[in-house]
Amino acid sequence: MNAITIVIASMCILMIAYRLYGTFMAVKVLKLDDSKPTPAHVLEDGKDYVPTSRWVTFGHHFAAIAAAGPLVGPILAAQFGYLPGLLWLLIGAVIGGAVHDAVVLFASMRKNGQSLSEVAKQELGPVAGFCTGLAMLFIITITMAGLSMVVLHALEKNPWGTFAVGMTIPIAMGVGLYHKKTGNLKGASTIGFTLIMVAVFSGPYIQNTVVGDWLTLDIKTLALALPIYAFFAAALPVWLLLAPRDYLSSFMKIGVFIALIIGVFIINPAIPFPAVTEFVHGGGPILAGPVWPFISITIACGAISGFHAFVGSGTTPKMLDRWSDIKVVGFGAMLVECLVGVMALIAATALHPGDYFAINSTPEVFRTLGMDVVNLPQLSQEIGINLEGRTGGAVTLAVGMTYIFTEIPWFSNLASYFFQFVIMFEAVFILTAIDAGTRVARYLIQDFFGEFYQPLKKVDWLPGSIFASLLACFMWGYLLVSGDIGSIWALFGVSNQLMASIGLIVGATVILKVADKRRYMLTCLVPLAYLYVTVNYAGYWMVKNVYLNPEAAGYSVLNSALSIIMLVLGFIILVTAIKKWRELLEAPSSDLRIDAG
């Protein structure tokens, strides 16, 4: 198997799916009608509700949903071979992810852009609304821990990478200040990107200096530093750090993956990985569980992701200019993210299996696998750091992309620069998600606890903001310090896919009300049935074999409690939804159309 075959076949499948299934969802199922004004027009305020071009909204939505998930998940899942991950990415994105994102966006727009918890409250009742809000709080917390874990292993004892990533903070703030003062977006973009490249190319000169020694940090130090950084980043004005970092990282993400696609077409690397490895039955060094259900838990973003519901019922529904834009923004952006996941899978499986497992396993575990490294010693020497045992996925992606790029003769001597640039590119994107995610967690905490203490609901109340930010950072920071990538990423996968199940439940309810044919709710029920069974079995497996197993590396009573609570919340929401569906199915179709209108 070679990479070009996978890329071309994947692109063709995704384009056909968008043209046929996307149109079916937009015209037949959701019945998108541009004669009706969107919430952006009805509630236009120049701040949150702003009618925006579909392509600008697409860029915002894609940047928000495509964080580290489609990069890391496929890389960790490569443990099972390239075929299981590829199949789940394509099938999951078309049948599940794109449908989920489109229906959640549609459901939120029907309720004037309200959050999914508010939509669930109105569509399914107060119990489902409360459970959805609580589940969202758990999920955003676990998501922050999972994403941060990736940064830890990328920057561990890597002063060059730490310097480059650290410099993006003052650079982004400088870009924000410059743009706010001058309004010159083009100039701010040019200056910001130039300074970032200077930071990357300056890395080698600080490695063996006093500054380099200061920046040679272990995992424990980094695990304490990230929540502290997130607290201040979430408290700063959005325009000062979050927005310019998001803007600059979007350019980098698009540019890097366009370059990777070009590199694959130039080099056409062979895929030395087998289609299926011996670990499909379980016992792997990265993920202990079997290929099912863990392929669908490990690869969340890129196939179907509940985290997208935060965006699809957050900023995006307040920006869409026309209802038909849901097809481009909701359905289309998910398929593009799927392609990002496919490219990440190619970058990982382009490595020799021995090299891949040496990076993603501890040295002690790797010695038990009976594998030999092939290109890793040479790559470690060219890059300038020891690559063995750097679990988490980020290093594997950087090594895989570096391996592909340096096969081009012009770039053969730039391995260290490519590697550190990709590390910085990943970390910047993850930090952007951490900034925004911590801020969202703060809002959720204030909204949830505001039911018991009213002043907390005021987002501009400084003591309440500080309390909520500290609590959010403490919660995901504790998970970060106490976990490992296998257990944390599995916990993230279970919670994320449970959130996607909730999104599909709400979507099925809405479709039952608006569609001409009740069987169209199967567009949500089919992926929901698979996902709900998968997520519950995965949660049960992790609780039994890892979280409550004292001999397992990921032993954690806290993670066990979180998993059980989330699965119970999901069960309550499903039972509530089934009762609602029975009422709707027994009601005359004319009554449903009146309600939908």
Image (cartoon, rainbow, N blue to C red):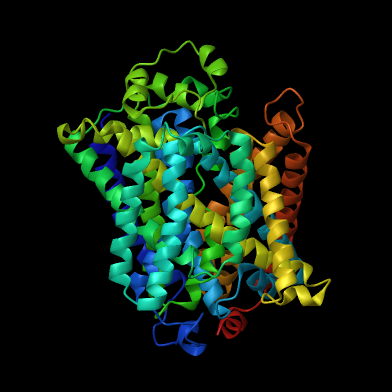
**With respect to residue 169, does 453 lie above or below?**
below
Taking the spot 75% from the left edge, 67% from the top edge, the residue there is 448
Relative image position of residue 65 (x, y in whole percent): 47, 58
Q: Quadrant of the N terminus?
A: top left
- The image quadrant that residue 574 belongs to is bottom right
- The image quadrant that residue 138 belongs to is bottom right
Relative image position of residue 153 (x, y in whole percent): 52, 35
- The image quadrant that residue 375 belongs to is top left
Q: How many marks?
A: 0
Taking the spot 74% from the left edge, 70% from the top edge, the residue there is 464
> Which of 417/440 is in front?
417
> Which of 190/204 is in front?
204
> Which of 14/167 is in front?
167
- As drawn, is 215 to the left or to the right of 583? left
Asked if residue 29 can be seen in this view, the reply is: yes
Relative image position of residue 317 (x, y in whole percent): 49, 74
> Which of 502/183 is in front?
183
Q: Quadrant of the C terminus?
A: bottom right
